[in-house]
Amino acid sequence: MIENDGGTKAILSEQKSYHSDKVKQNLAHRLNRIEGQVRGIKGLIERDVHCDDVITQIAAVQAALNGVAKVLLEGHMKNCVVERIQEGDMEVLDEILVTIKKLIKK
């Protein structure tokens, strides 16, 4: 379990993921941009910018996070899931369905 800056806790799996350096750089770049967008939203709120403009920026952050999730999901399915199926571990299908449900549960 980890605790983030906001004080919320998340349970993390003990399993490791193996991403290429190129994918890690891509994800890090996307997340850095998202971090900047979130700081920008905070600034908009502090400056009392019109609600529609703030909501537009929030939607952009949500779309960017979905993009990160898509990259991760694609890599997970093409590598981890396929590998486990090839090893005869069909339980991975139930696990990936749970993961997908979490992503679309908005």
Image (tube, rainbow, N blue to C red):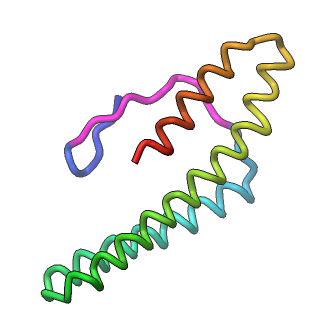
14 versus 51 height, above or below? above
Task: Tell me where residue 20 appears, x and y as whole percent.
Answer: 75, 49
Q: Which residues are magenta?
A: 8-17
Residue at the (73%, 30%) spot, across then down:
80
Q: Quadrant of residue 93?
A: top right
Residue at the (61%, 20%) spot, across then down:
94
Task: Tell me where residue 8 appears, x and y as whole percent.
Answer: 24, 41
Residue 18 is left or right of residue 52, and the answer is right
* The residue positioned farthest toward the top in the image shown: 88
91 versus 32 height, above or below? above
Residue 100 is left or right of residue 45, and the answer is right
Nearest the viewer among 76 and 4 is 76
Residue 62 is left or right of residue 99, and the answer is left
Residue at the (28%, 39%) spot, across then down:
3
Q: Is residue 106 magenta?
A: no
Task: Tell me where residue 47 appears, x and y as whole percent.
Answer: 15, 88
**Count of numbered marks:** 0
Q: Is residue 16 magenta?
A: yes
Which of the image's four quarters has the N terminus? top left
Q: Quadrant of residue 81?
A: top right
Main secondary structure type of the part rendered in magenta: loop
13 versus 17 height, above or below? above
Nearest the viewer among 68 and 56 is 56
Q: Quadrant of residue 48?
A: bottom left
Task: Tell me where residue 96 appears, x and y as whole percent.
Answer: 62, 29
* The residue positioned farthest toward the right in the image shown: 86
Residue at the (25%, 51%) spot, across then down:
5
